[in-house]
Image (cartoon, helix red, strand yellow):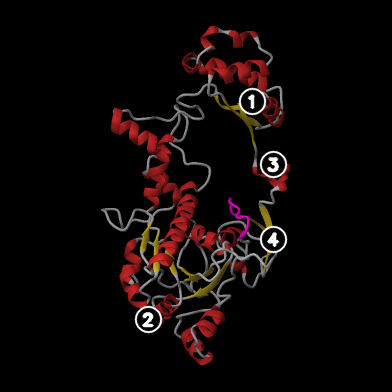
Amino acid sequence: MGPRRRPLEGIRVADLTIVVAGPTATGVLGDLGAEVIKIEHIVARGDTSTALPKAPHVDEDRPYNRGNWFHDLNRSKKAITLNFVVPEAKELFKRLVAMSDVVVQNFSPRVMENHGLTYTALREVKPDIIMASLPGFGMDGPMRNRTSFGPGIEAVTGLGDLTGFPDGPPMKPGNFVTDYTAGMMAAFAIMAALHYRKRTGKGQHLELAMRDGALQFIGEPLMDFAMNGRVQSRIGNRHPAMSPHGVYRCNGEDMWVAIAVGSDDEWERLRSALGDPEWARDERFATVTGRLHHQDQIDGHLNEWTGQRSHYSAMQTLQAAGIDAGAVLTTSEIGTDPHYNARRFMQPVYIPEAGPIRLSRQGFRLSETPGEIGAGPNFAADNHYVFRDLLGLTESEIADLEAKQAIAWRPVTQMGRL
């Protein structure tokens, strides 16, 4: 049996993405074997590296290569620099596009338009190119040129308004949910476009507005308003049709267990797991409707029971009885969780100038073409590979481009940004 290939080997991606959503998409493609060439502006990295925790290895000469988050988001990629303010840099980019299969960018529409690098323009360079655009609000509409990070998207989609407790303000989810999911959606759509091109020989422009992607999270509230005129509100950890449903304090500092009971049969199993206490025999709790009307009382009793147990013990007791329950784990507990470690989710990667760090693998596995995590790129690490080996420039031409600040090997002082 020969070596297992990664499924996207032979695909080249010109990656103009920044921050989270775009790099997430191209990181998936890179893990699956695509040659992803990340194109950075020549100004020092700042979008996902300098303000966040650094890798432990110290290289004071090039600290910009030590951003943990940057390497996680940009794993399995190569890196070059281009300064689109200089016309020669745009020409180099077009030459790279002519040798690529996919271009991915997550700027607002005006950026590529201002640089004359729209899908229409790139099709003249490579007729079957696939271009994926991930603007915050879409390629058209009155908000097309606005930019946003994930928390802003969560606010303007109503997701933030639905997150939180009834007596508190709107809240953002615990992580950049809409960024990461937009990236995964984009990777999926890019692979669909590659499949279409393989069948037809035609490329296409793929648009994934982050706001549109995030709206899929609140489909039920949107439908409820459209059909019934009801505006759903924050309900914390509760559920509109299940009770009890929430997180309950356990023995230990800030330890919790999540419990969900979806039917009367599950309620009977919960009663049995609790030892059938007298309070649980209350007829008001016998039906879902009754339990929904008396959640405060039920939660108070459940907190008394969970408060005498560890979150793992409560989880195991309830799961053994067929109840949906899960210990609420901290990130440090996840790192020592036996099941998590048995599945080797975090994998060691050595990054020059940053040292050994552990990166998360993709959440999916392919049995025959599993892919692998590659190191994130150091700044301008692949300038020679792309400019000399792929594009055929001479050393003197490369030196001339550097002198004009069209490219750089080290971050330069502040200039105009894209």
- Crowding at dot 1, Cα within 10 Å, few <14 / some 14-19 / many 20+, comes out as some
In the image, the segment drawn in magenta is: 361-370
N-term-proximal mark, 2 vs 3: 2
- Compared to residue 341, the image places residue 130 above or below, namely below
For label 1, the residue is 322
In the rendered image, residue 238, in percent from the top left (x then y), is placed at 50, 27
Please tell me the numbered disc located at residue 87.
Answer: 2
Seen in the image, is 119 located left or right of residue 3? left
- x%, y% of residue 47? 50, 61
Q: Label 3 vs label 1: CA separation?
A: 24 Å
- What residue is at 65 percent from the left and 38 percent from the top? 329
Which residue bears the numbered disc 4? 56
Q: Nearer the viewer, mark 1 or mark 2?
A: 1
Say which residue appears at 45% left-offset and 80% top-offset.
Answer: 406
Of residue 417 and residue 383, the one placed in the foreground of this image is: 383
The residue beneath circle 3 is 333
Amino acid type of the residue tagged 1 in the rendering: Gly
* Mark in the foreground, 4 or 1: 1
Alpha carbon separation for disc pair 4 and 3: 21 Å
